[in-house]
Amino acid sequence: MKALRLLSAIAGRLALCATLLQPAASQADTYEVKLPPELATAPRMCDYAPCKDVIPGATTFSERKGQPWYVEAYKDEAGQKKLLGYVMLSTDITDIPAYSGKPVVTLIGMDTAGKFTGVKILKHSEPILLLGIPESALVKFNNQYLGKFVGDNIEIGKSRPEENLIGLDAITGATVTVIAQNQVMMTSGSEVAKQVGILKPVNRPQARFPVSTATPSWADLVADGSVQRLTVKPEEVGLKSDGRPYMDLWFGYLNQPTIGHAILGKDGYDSLMGRLKEGEHAIFIVANNSMDSFKGSGFVRGGLYDRVQVRQDKDGFTFRDLDYVNLWGISAAGAPAFNESAIFIIRGKSFSAAYPWKLVFLGNKIDKETAAKTFANFDREYWLADKYLEGGRPVVVKPDPTWLKVWKDKVVEIIAFTALLLVIAAAYASRDKLVRRADRKNKWPVNAFKYTGWVLSIGFVGFYAMAQPSITQVLTWFHSLLFQWKWELFLSDPLIFIFWIFIIVTVFVWGRGLFCGWLCPFGSLSELLYKIGQAVGLKRFQFHLPQALHDKLKWVKYAVFFGLLAVSFFSMGLAEQLAEVEPFKTTFLVGLFNRSWPYTLFAGGLLGLSIFTERPFCKYLCPLGAALAMPTTFRWFGLKRKDECTSCKACAKGCGSLAIDTKGNIDQRECMLCLDCMVLYYDDHACPPLAQERKRRDKAGQPLTPINGKGYFIPIHPAPANTKKEGAAA
Amino acid sequence: MTIADKNELRHPPYDQASGFGWLLAELRDHLWPWAGKGQPARKAIQGAGFALALAATVAWVMAALGHLSAGAIIGWWFGWSVFEVLVRLDAKPYVKEGPWWGHLYRRASVMDMLCYVSFKNLLIGAALFIGLKSAGILQL
Ligand code: SF4
Ligand code: SF4
């Protein structure tokens, strides 16, 4: 037996070494690595995880224990085992997802005083850490926890000693990841700290109930929230539907006399209350027609109901077999049928019915791709209505959701960015006025806005705020649209969120040109380089590809886009890696010189080429440009053209985007809305039909009337004979 | 395309209609790729199109009955969309030019049609997909 255990331990260690060490040479140490399946379930967790790394000095470890799980770490001291601290696996405790929607599997060590001793990422699925920010940034981030006390108020951002708040430095560009990671650290740490007595439970004032003679029906109880329903769909746990919900629970709080009487009847209520000691509470749960049991079988083996839990703020309450009482029936009129039922007794002193609490169903989600089980929680809030509490509900300040915190933190950037977008959109909306003020030789009335847009989008949006939109976001939507839409995911990056709303609206109104031509950080940078090249005397080296070749090559970007889309259906991870065809991360997120040479060469090469030919990446490669070009087919308001444009080539010659065809039509999918051709359109020295008319009138001694909206001089009509009279009459 | 060459403009048979009648005709045009009155089209493409559309409809119905997986229905919808491009290029080779509420149409290039069909079918597909999913029928 011993030998067997030893063997399995060795095998486990080997498997672990293989998984943890093998990709160590590459950049992506723990990105989507395959962890040994035993890690999630084996009692001897530390045989499969590098526990010693997170609790220095420890030599032996206990089996998994507690609810949720942790292990004890010991060191040998003069032949005695001395408790050094605790090690926990984040996914045993919480399923808080990071940016990718999947949790970062983290091994956490904590000493007996509740101070963090080590943090190690075993697996993550954050593409940003794989492709943009080096993983070492996350390691550095995690190291900030070392020595900090689990009961402290630790948050991302600046420390605020007056509020007792310890701030941690975020990783720029990965805010969501670190906010999630902080929640994981603090939740995991405090769950274990509470179990082992390092953190004392919060004492909440107990509820007092008003006397009432009402006997509410089931429908009344549902309406006032005294019974709540928690439903889990089969697809939420990765199962096939058979028409029934996976879990369909009704639950409620029984100590409140009106509710208790309604559910249990007077005798039932009195007898239950007779069993409860001071500070104990009872809840009921019934389930009907569910695919699974909420009691599970855990209580048979370990005496613990491992599928349901009550949570109040940070305190969790679990139920053992001694906390269970049979529920035979529900008295309230109109109650639904049920085939599983229970009364559970909450024995934690800190629970108070005056405050909101949650019933948590602890499920497992089976991953379709890997068939691996991951932990998934489902909960439903419960809070007695005012009328059931003496003095009504107490005031409860709920913490802001993560995304809201981010928005509040970035309020200045958000305002500045929104202002930038509005000003550029307003400038473009007034293009007719601007281009009339400009002419072929002086395009400043237009360019002042455009160049300002460029500079701000490169410096502020790109380098400072790292809000360069990317094709990966489009792929994420496709998937979210089909699989699971989570607003939080999109809201967690405010600038990108606002940018996308702007992009979607303007693509339909004017086409992709306003974003691509005026505001895309990378696009702006590459065209700015071209303009700088022009200004510093490199003009003679600058070139456009021949139109015929361009017309072929422009399709490449669509192929890149569809290729990425197709790959993303098979593997989002791979698609994210292939999305490196966008040099955005190298340029703005990580910095040209902080990446390995192939990336630097690619991005640097494209930018270098941009000095000599206008926007090569935008024209031929950019999958985002392609994705935006497609709906641009239906933009509402296009640019203007005259009949003469069919034979005149003046605009086409000047179009840096090569977007004007031989018939004078503008291909809106390629057009960057630079407005050069619109300047020409009204320029009576540059637009051939206008220039001709100007010369003709000059010769004939006729006045030059203003140019109308169609791009022609307003025709001169002989004044009608009776104008004067009419005028006089008027 | 921002049109200089007026030869590119097109008039579908219903472009004289107005108000509600026009809206209905537009809706029909989006949902019915085959030729209508006054729209010459090749029989073979139309016929094959009908057959494939029927198959795609059966696929959606099967998905609705819970007999088809999400991946399969995406595949079917994609396949049909490719063919719809061909059917439309043959029977209704125009797309809207300018605002959606306007009455201007232009000759559709292959790319125009591809963009039109993929965008329209993405919306239809997403609506059906989300419908089936929220009804708990389709599994992901
Ligand atoms: S084509 Fe791509 S890189 Fe160029 S401006 Fe558009 S989104 Fe930016
Ligand atoms: S010159 Fe005209 S057609 Fe060409 S990119 Fe500029 S606005 Fe578009």
Image (tube, coloured by chain):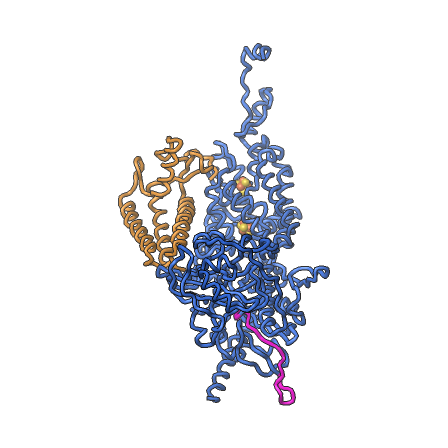
Chain colours: A blue, B orange
* Span shown in magenta: A75-92
Q: Residue at x 56, y 77 (%)?
A: A71
In the rendered image, residue A296, in percent from the top left (x then y), is placed at 43, 70
In the rendered image of this protein, does residue A43 appear above or below residue A684? Answer: below
In the rendered picture of this protein, how many numbered marks are placed on residues?
0
In the rendered image, residue A710, in percent from the top left (x then y), is placed at 52, 29
Quarter the C terminus of chain A occupies:
top right
Q: Residue at x 54, y 49 (%)?
A: A500
In the rendered image of this protein, does residue A725 appear above or below residue A626? Answer: above
Left or right of residue A584, residue A567 in this image = left
In the rendered image, residue A703, in percent from the top left (x then y), is placed at 60, 21
A79 within the magenta span: yes
Between residue A269 and residue A1, name the one nearer to us: A269
Between residue B91 and residue B17, name the one nearer to us: B17
Between residue B8 and residue A234, name the one nearer to us: A234
Main SS, magenta residues: strand
In the rendered image, residue A8, in percent from the top left (x then y), is placed at 47, 83
Q: Is residue A370 visible?
A: no
Quadrant location of residue A715?
Answer: top right
A442 within the magenta span: no
Between residue A10 and residue A305, name the one nearer to us: A305
Q: Is residue A213 visible?
A: yes
Q: Extreme right residue here? A: A162
